[in-house]
Amino acid sequence: DGAVVARVLMEGGEAVGVEVLRRGRSHEAFARHGVVLAAGALGTPKVLALSGIGDPLELQRLGVPVRVANREVGQGLSDHLATYTWFMIRGADEQLLQGENCKHGEKFNIFFNLTEPPTGGDGPVDAEVRLFTDCNISRKTIDFGVEAVLLSPESRGRVFVPTARAEDAAIVDFPALWESDYDRLEQLLVRFGEALGLGPKDLISDKGETLAESVRSKAYLYQHFCCSARVAPEGQPGVCDERLRVRDVGRLY
């Protein structure tokens, strides 16, 4: 119904409820046992900041009184990093340019890890590959497209709160992606090509770009944001403890 959480209400260092804006009017809702923030990777740090929990310099810019100083709020934003490239199969027989071979669509997707061991074991699942096929009738080629995805890239951004108005959306601030992630995307495509029996010289995009050029020109974020209110054990930088309690605030999770 258009209701927006403006901030967490606090008394004596504890969360007691929330202020809600609905149809231009402010309302207060009080909690019996505690307040659980479930506003997502972008909304949660915004609500914390507007409640006075965050980086003191950012709160000063917003004109919000500091209740709990924590520079980790909104930091460490992460997302899947992907790249999508079409490759041309050389020397395709024109007789193949029909039927299922030219039916556009996703043929399969697989998950695996880039770390050792590559198969089996307890290594993390940190990569995904999706394969698409299509035909280019004008140049008489069978093409295949590969979307390579890093599930846990090293690149990090932040959530930026532009104003103290609860109605204004938070902004994703993602600087240039880290070179190490571009290298891992390239490694992912090479390994997938090897599984198909293709060498590096075969992995030239349909625009004539090298694999390295294609990865860097076509990389994008997946819009599966996370990690902007980091959980961390005691003694390490973070927003919440291992029981999901917001640090230095009672009854706020």
Image: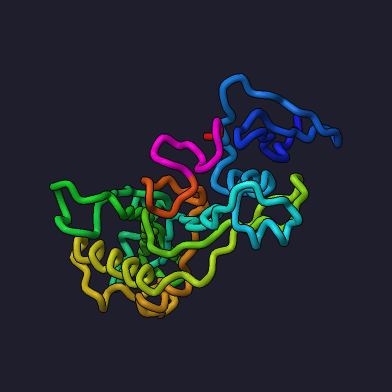
Where is residue 99 shown, x and y percent of the image?
36, 50
Choose top left, top right, bottom left or bottom right for residue 194.
bottom left
Identified at 85% across, 33% down, the residue is 25
Identified at 30% across, 68% down, the residue is 92
Identified at 46% across, 67% down, the residue is 219
For this view, does 57 lie left or right of residue 174? right
Looking at the image, the residue that sits furthest to the top is 32
Q: Which residues are magenta?
A: 240-251
Q: Quadrant of the N terminus?
A: top right
Choose top left, top right, bottom left or bottom right for residue 252.
top right
For this view, does 177 lie left or right of residue 33? left
Where is residue 239 shown, x and y percent of the image?
49, 47
Residue 249 drawn in magenta: yes
In depth, the one of 187 and 153 nearer the eye is: 153
**Majority SS type along the magenta span:** loop
Where is residue 123 shown, x and y percent of the image?
20, 51
Identified at 79% across, 29% down, the residue is 27
Q: Is residue 117 above or below residue 50?
A: below
Inspect this view and state whether residue 247 appears.
yes
Q: Is residue 163 above or below residue 206?
A: above
In depth, the one of 37 and 139 nearer the eye is: 37
For this view, does 143 lie left or right of residue 188? right
Q: Is residue 202 above or below residue 42?
A: below
Where is residue 20 shown, x and y percent of the image?
75, 33
Looking at the image, the residue that sits furthest to the right is 24
In depth, the one of 100 and 45 nearer the eye is: 45
Residue 187 drawn in magenta: no
